[in-house]
Amino acid sequence: MRKPLKLIAAALFFGLFLSACWDMQDIENQNIVTAVIVDKTETGYALYIEVAAIGATAQGQEGAQQSPQNIIIRGEGETYESARKDLENKSNKTLFIGGVQSLIFTEKVAEESIAEYIFRVRHEPLYRKTLRVFVLKGDPMEVLRSSNENNPLIGLAVNENIMSLYESGYALDVNVLDILAGLSCPNKSLVIPTLEMIEDNVGTTGYTVFDNGKAKGFIPAEDAVGLLALTARKFKTTQTLRLRDVDFTVELKRTKKKIKSNREGGGAAFKIEVAFKAFLMYPSRKINVTAEIQSELKALLEEKMKESIIKEIIRATKTYETDYLDLYDVFRIKNAPYCREIDWKEIFPDIKYEASVKVDMKMNERIEYSQGGS
Amino acid sequence: MSTFKAAQHKALIELRNKGVAHAERTIRLAKCEIKALYVKQIVDTKDLAEFIIKPLIEWNKNEELSASKAVSEIIQAYDVKTDDDMGKIVDYILDGMVVLLLSADDAYIVANIKKVEHRSIPKPEITYTLRGPRDCFTENLDVNLSLIRYRMKDPNLRVDLMTAGKRSKTSVAVIYIEDIANPKIVREIKKRIDALSVDILWGTGELEQMLQNSPADLFTQFGTTERSDWACEALVEGKVLIMVDGGGIAIFLPHTFSETMIACDDRYDNKFFGLFSRIIRYLSLLLTLCSSSFYIAMVSFRADILPANFIITIAQMRQSVLFPAIVDVLIIEFLIELMRESMIRVPTKIGPAIGIVGAIVIGQAAIAAGIFSPLLLIIAATSLMASFAIPNYFGSHPFRILKFYLIFATGILGFYGMILALTTIMISLVSANSFGVPYMAPIAPFNLYDFVRSLFFSRAHSKKRMQYQKTIDDTRSDPPTLEEKAKEKNIQLREEE
Amino acid sequence: MSREVTNRQLVMILVIMLATTAPTFLSKTMAEATEGGFWFAILVTGVIFSLLALLITLLQRKNPGKTLFDHAKDAFGPFWANVIALIYIVFFLLALIFITTDIVSMVSANLLLKTPKWFILFFTLAVSGYGAAKGITNIARLFEIYGFFALTGSVILYVIMLFLGDINYIRPLFVKEDLGRYFGAVWKTAFAFVGLEIITVIPFAKQNKKFPLVSVISTLGIALFYILSVGASIMMIGMEEIRFYKYPVMTAIRQIDIIQIDFLQRFDVVHLFVLLMGANASFMLTSCGGVEYMTKAFPKMKRIIAVLLLTAMAFAGGIFASFFENFHDIAINVLTYYMIFTAFIIPVLLLIFGRRKRNAETA
């Protein structure tokens, strides 16, 4: 009697084993999503996904690794959930969102609010919170169809583009977790890089200002020097200065950023000190770059950078009245108990500030600038 | 003419009745008759004629000859003794001895002029060496013992001969250095050999299975070697060496996991290179065990641990593959094991052809047919090569089996299943022991001195032997007396009755 | 079989037992309770528990080769010793149910989304039972190996997070107006140190006089480790945002993206291995603790039966727990209160009564 019981138990056990593997799904049986664009329609929302088209190698040359092209799928619905379901219905395979590199919101959604979708991303375990977020000015389909031989997958392309700009110090990099951290704290807001079609390619053209998940305005890239100088983790810029009828191209790197805050009256005051290291790259024509010229360039640069920083503070306090410069954090660190009593949004537009900029001018060590000339 | 005594007659009749195919040579002397009994296939008949029969015939004096007199004054063979137990005659003859019954004495003479055909000393086949000596053991125990004696001239070297197998009566040599080896281990192994109840014993492989702590043990408690220098190294480290007549591999104990990763050549190489090699071996073990399961976990469960472009590349590679990842892995692992088995048994002449067929079939054709992806083939091939990097060939066998266990576990529960399976393997490893020595020593329980030595060996800078062996004398300098050392270490030399 | 545990093994046991599961949710608890002053609350709790560890190890040292059960038998007699054993059996059973269901929930939420929890729990408990059957010495050896990897891996990951995160998230580090809050948070942090009771089943070797010092330093080390873990997690996610995650450390580690390393840029799998290896070892030890008390209280019970019984009860408990949404919070509260008996009251009573009995015998 014991032996049949043991056999039955063993059979059930192994049957359980073999019928298991609920979570096993091979990667080639899923659609790898590389970009998601969230758009608003008249009746609800539309979700565009870019899927890496795999399967060309079967017909391709033996041994050749072909770049995958993209497949665009559009899902629509009254809510995000129904739009997602529509996407899944239209997709021939399960969607694998672990590969999403870029999350893009159109202007319409940005103006309404991106908070709800961001909260969806928080809830979804497969979505990586490091995926980069952008705002799109233009038609999603046009952007997704702009993929070419150099940029076969738009999701990867824009991600790599912003990464390289960020690593060089030329751009801000915003991911989902940054936005979630900002949404969790009502006193803080943020800016998100904005994409646009530039000729036939997608590029970053500026930053959209968000307050509590809603778009408030736009800062063009060429006007965002002050913004980057104050908020970017790494900052680098190239400036052209006119002096004595010569255009000097100078590269600046931020070396120090110190913001001190204290209470003043019923509000806050900030003292901002920023230091840069500047490298003279080249003048527009032959000129002997003397010490006098160097010091004049330095003064010009200091003034220009200070102007940019102050302009940005004015924009944040007066134009948008929202703190996307992280000044709240600086104030809170020093005045934590006081911060619990005040409404930062009321105080912020009237903050007092003082900015000072120092530039350490250096010449390019490989070039001899004072070789003679007019 | 003297006649044989009743007991001798009885022994002769018994011998003939048993049907033991033996030869008899009668020598009639003036006052004595001698009967030589032997099995001619296993006796050196030339030595028999030259050193036993001839001297006896030439002696032929008119007096009764006793066995002891014959041994001390007449017989010129080098290994001779007397005995009076008639029951042992058959055993002696079957063991290759010549038994000389003397009519004038109750005792008989036993002369060892065994001659068994055996191979000359071969080169190593399992453990290749670049710098080390290349003499290996053969099937003949005497030859093997001579190789050991040639290297180890220590007066404390003990060779205890035992017998195992009721029918085969195989000689088993238990070899150790008396003032180094832990006497508890020596006693234990002898006890286990004595307790064996089998009819035949063919080699150390079988003996190993019989002497293990438990029949269910997957990890071997014995080290193996075909090389005499490595066997001597084991003796000097305080291990007990066991050799079986008829088997060309010696086993030694105690044996730990870290010793599986030590190759013979490590002693002859630069210590830094030895460290480098050992690290490579540990990584190889990890590769052997985990690479296929990691592939399944990555492809079928958590592809998002890789960046997006890698995920896309892998998906492209697998696009035309017919089977799910786990089935793919099982098929290729099966094919590799099949190839391994066939390569061992294939005749030498067609071995290379099989290799080519295997490479073409599994490699090119399988990928073209969509059975495997190129990445899986690389992983499987790497895993195969990694398994060969483990110096102890027999020590790698459990990991070849456990690889499949890991594959199944990963197939069911992904990374978590892999971790659960690894945990069970680890707990099995740490709880195993080889005759009282923890199998994972010196890693767990950790001993810094032993751990450094297991990675980084230099005899000149290792003043002491491995501490986990608990040897009597753990120093490499001039040893004190056995009793002194045993007293210092509080070790009981002899078992209390 | 020798049941002794070396100092190194004890350190690994304490560190991994406590430092594997607690950090997964501790950062959320601390962010809610103390904000930037989490280090203060954890340090204070660490000091308190190091004193408790000292208390237990002093008790063990007085009677080398014996466990707490043996002390209890000597001090109070077999009946009360069995009662104490039952208290500890229930404690270890509850602790086992809690940590297994917690880790299973985490695995289910992050790794195996479709696999039923009972299936994962079944295999988890099967493995922990297998380890428990091997005994405390072998599990201690496993901790020696796992501990090294788990500790090194965790520390490296947290240090990377310190570099990648934003320090402003954890500042200000101390606000004197919030001192009351910090002390109040000690109670919430206490749960992170549940597991010290495992020392009660480890017999001390006679010559191991450093055991008490080692356990104190280990407990303080664990406190520092928690500070590192909580700080790193908050720096990655943000003080406000972290409150939305049940297992913030997982989320924080998924943030690590070091492009320069290319295909290894995502560190999830390293953390997974490190966390789950340590967790598995902890399950085994907790299970072993319960089994040890069961075999002591019921000497006629075979070890394998005790293992099967405990594992079956833990499985049933785990299934039962899945019906409660807030089981996690209930269990934390229950175990924290229970710990007052197992880590403080009982050892103190044994120390007092044991000393009285020794004095009486000497007199």
Image (spheres, rainbow, N blue to C red):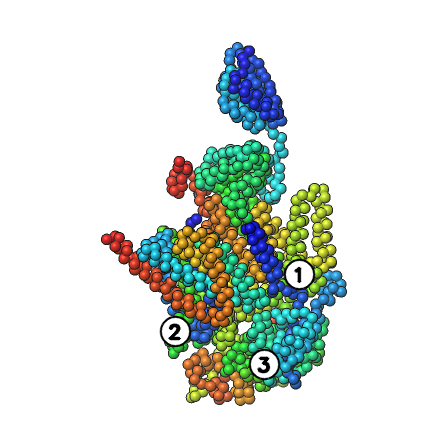
Residue B294 percent across, percent down from the top left: 60, 59
Instruction: Say what secondary structure mark 3 lies in.
Output: loop
| Whether label 3 touches label 2, CB < 8 Å | no
Closer to the camera in the image, B421 or B129? B421
- The residue singled out by tag 1 in the image is B324
Q: What's the amino acid at mark 2? A: Gly
Instruction: Name the chain under label 1.
Output: B
Residue C144 visible within the image: no
User: Can marks 3 and 2 be said to lie on one chain?
Assistant: no
Asked if residue A72 lies left or right of residue B74, the reply is right
Instruction: Name the chain under label 3.
Output: A
Residue plotted at (73% across, 63% down): A64
- The residue singled out by tag 3 in the image is A114
Numbered tag placed on residue B185 in the rendering: none
Mark in the foreground, 3 or 1: 1
Q: Quadrant of residue C259?
A: bottom right
- The residue singled out by tag 2 in the image is C184
Asked if residue C144 lies left or right of residue C210, the reply is right
Instruction: Say what secondary structure mark 2 lies in.
Output: helix
| Whether label 1 touches label 2, CB < 8 Å | no
Closer to the camera in the image, B127 or B118? B118
Q: CA distance from mark 3 to mark 2?
A: 38 Å
Closer to the camera in the image, C119 or B266? C119
Q: CA distance from mark 3 to mark 1?
A: 39 Å
Image height of C327 relative to A78, above or below = above
Residue A95 percent across, percent down from the top left: 65, 71
Residue C305 percent across, percent down from the top left: 46, 54
Mark in the foreground, 1 or 2: 1
Residue density around tag 2, few if under 14, some if 14–19, many if 20 or more, within 10 Å: some
Q: What's the amino acid at mark 1? A: Pro
Q: Which residue occupies the extreme left position in the image?
A: C363
